[in-house]
Amino acid sequence: MNTIGLIFDLDGVIVDTAKFHFLAWKKIAREIGFKLTEEHNEKLKGVSRVDSLHRILDWAGVSVSDEKFNEMAHLKNIDYLTYVDKMNAADILPGVETFICQAKAKGYPIALGSASKNASKILKHVGIYDLFDVLVDGNSVSKAKPDPEVFIRAAQKLALPVENCVVFEDAEAGIQAANTAHMLSIGLGDKYILRNAKYVFPNFTEITLEFIEQQATKK
Ligand code: BG6
Ligand code: MG
């Protein structure tokens, strides 16, 4: 193995935005008389905006016209962006920036593999846009996680075989996508929820680059 490519999910891995998505979806759900819970929110992690709204409407047992659907998705995003606009470097999750900088210092290419259409905006807001060699986000893929398209596209842009890529993910759907793409999947968060990941850590302060290098080389 010559090099490894490190592919990072955004929401819940680099920045703590899950709480903002939750607040914005709760507001939309309330308007249709549905109480969105933390358990529901867990099922929305890593899921695209459109698919998230489909799930919420399903859970609520509500159907809406296409026009209303688009309006709801649009309003959710407007509300979500009011939180994003207040984000800064303090919203970067513990240890991740240091980890990326160490990997870059060793020459490993860094990619973003996110479902979000707001990814560039968020990375610029928190000041780490320039750390990424490759960006693949919700604007550049046609199939949402758990489909592996986002990570396969990232590997192609990194010009690396999928076996040389490591994915960092906080969502079940993302771990599934990484596994289907035949990449080493590293979960960030709850061991039980992310039980399909090859390894799970609570956050980046617990991960060493040496460990990742060893595991990626072993594959
Ligand atoms: C994922 C989030 O990263 O991006 C999901 O985990 C979100 O909660 C999805 O729905 C799409 O994000 P956006 O910013 O395009 O609405
Ligand atoms: Mg995520």
Image: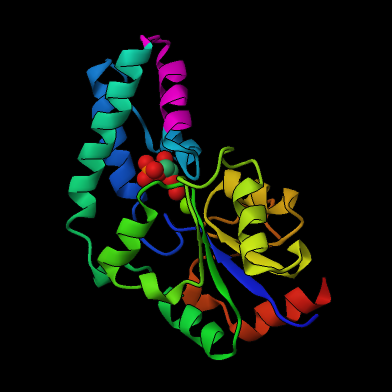
Could you say which is closer to the camera, residue 112 or residue 55? 112
The answer to if 58 sits in the magenta stretch is yes
> Does the rendering let one see residue 184?
yes
- Residue 187 location, x and y as percent? 59, 60
> Does the rendering let one see residue 187?
no
Is 147 located above or below residue 3 in the figure? above
- Residue 173 location, x and y as percent? 59, 43
Q: Quadrant of residue 122?
A: bottom left
Q: Is residue 209 left or right of residue 120?
A: right
Q: What residue is rendered at 27% in x and 22% in y? A: 71
- Residue 50 location, x and y as percent? 43, 30
Q: Is residue 75 left or right of residue 8?
A: left
Q: Quadrant of residue 162?
A: bottom right
Could you say which is closer to the camera, residue 166 or residue 25? 166
User: What kind of secondary structure does the magenta stretch mostly adopt?
Assistant: helix
Is 158 located above or below residue 197 in the figure? below
The answer to if 219 sits in the magenta stretch is no
Q: Is residue 106 left or right of residue 26?
A: right
Q: What residue is rendered at 23% in x and 19% in y? A: 31
The quadrant of the image that shows the N terminus is bottom right
Q: Residue furthest bottom?
A: 105
Quadrant hosting ligand 1 = top left
Could you say which is closer to the camera, residue 47 or residue 3? 3
Q: What residue is rendered at 58% in x and 82% in y? A: 208
- Residue 219 location, x and y as percent? 82, 70
Q: Is residue 188 left or right of residue 117?
A: right
What range is drawn magenta here? Answer: 50-65
Q: What residue is rendered at 49% in x and 39% in y? A: 47
Query: How many numbered circles are shown?
Result: 0
